[in-house]
Image: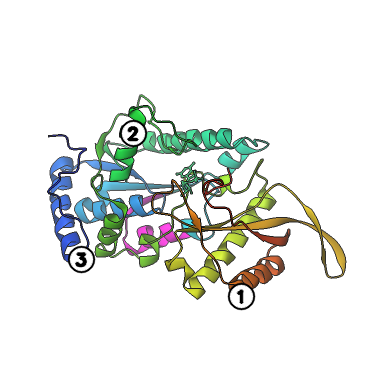
Amino acid sequence: MDTNRRPETMQRITTKALADAFIEEQVAQVRKQVGGRKVLLALSGGVDSSVVAALLIKAIGKQLVCVHVNHGLMRKGESEQVIDVFGKALDANLVYIDATERFLGLLAGVSDPERKRKIIGKEFIEVFADEARKLEGVEFLAQGTIYPDILESIKQAEGKKAVKSHHNVGGLPEDLKFELVEPVKLLFKDEVRVVGEALGLPHKMVYRQPFPGPGLGVRCLGAITRDRLEALREADAILRDEFDKCGLAEKVWQYFVIIPDVKSVGVKDDSRYEGWPAIIRAVNTTDAMSATIEEIPYAVLRKITERITSEVEGINRVLYDITPKPTGTIEWE
Ligand code: XMP
């Protein structure tokens, strides 16, 4: 039997009861596969790796070692949430690595989007591999692979070309050989979320909007500078906060801020103020292959604009990108 194919008879997980049954089955299966040995997991804080972490903590407790690599390109509060939920509430075996300096050092002066992606992806593997080598007796690697990832790999194997290189975490170096543990690989995203809630993860974590592996790195356009990256992180946090307050966060598929490497002349406190524009993107889609624009109410746009221009150092304008995909991609890089 091909264990990478979802059986046609497999019921969709839509309720807590079905999720509980799935969890019970997977807990037993993971215990059987792993025994008393250790499992390593790269915990980004995204939906899939978080659900796998919670499931494995339930199955094997401290035999799971979660490694969270903060590449310095996370959104505001994200790494802190990983520490709060996994390190504190779930008392996981969590290794937190602040690799901000390593990543930003390598990215300095690099403006080509695909080169930025490659640097971030490669460095991520290196930081993670360095950590894995320090740990004794780990024989398994857990991954948050889900069914669409498997379907995508099948498509790529059939020779279909991708527009951007989305796969950030490629293979680990040769000296690190692990057996894989992929408990949610036959699930679709909506099912992973139902399982996550049944495991008791916070609703906000489980229903988090998609966030690219290279993080804010592909939204701080061109060569990343620390001041522009900080402005982006703050502006994005304001957008998310306002979307939370008006209910759009539950409705819109993906919403975020982009900051280009361009300044315009503005005025602040009666003086000339040169600043960057913050560009708002809010899109809806089912498969990310095409996307439509969310029509944000004008009052919400005005509030976001007022807050970003008054609270964020370095920004003097707010723009709203109303281009669907195609012709625009969802991200700008
Ligand atoms: P685009 O910009 O291609 O984005 O329309 C489609 C979806 O993919 C996400 N995206 C990425 N995800 N690594 C990722 O893990 C990447 O390099 C990457 N680039 C884009 C994007 O956020 C959107 O959800």
In reply to whether residue 89 is colored magenta, the answer given is yes
The correct choice, above or below, for 307 with respect to 12 in the image is below
Q: Is mark 3 within 8 Å of ligand 1?
A: no
Amino acid type indicated by mark 1: Ala
State which quadrant residue 309 falls in.
Answer: bottom right
The secondary structure type at the circle numbered 3 is: helix
Q: Which mark is residue 299?
A: 1
Q: Which residue appears at 66% of the width and 70% of the height?
A: 307
What's the colour scheme? rainbow
Position of 12 compared to 157: left or right? left
Position of 167 compared to 197: left or right? right
Q: Percent from the top left, x then y, of residue 114? A: 56, 34
The secondary structure type at the circle numbered 2 is: helix
Q: Earlier in the sequence, mark 2 or mark 1?
A: 2
| Real-space Cα separation, disc 3 to disc 2, in angstroms | 32 Å
The secondary structure type at the circle numbered 1 is: helix
Residue 145 visible in image: no
Name the residue that disc number 3 marks.
16
| Real-space Cα separation, disc 3 to disc 1, in angstroms | 38 Å
Q: Residues within 10 Å of mark 2 (few under 14, many from 20)?
A: few
SS assignment for the magenta stretch, majority: helix
Q: Percent from the top left, x then y, of residue 151? A: 30, 39
Q: Which mark is residue 155?
A: 2
Q: Percent from the top left, x then y, of residue 180? A: 26, 37
Amino acid type indicated by mark 3: Lys
Q: Are marks 3 and 2 in contact (CB under 8 Å)?
A: no
| Stretch in magenta | 80-95
Q: Quadrant of the C terminus?
A: top right
In reply to whether residue 182 is colored magenta, the answer given is no
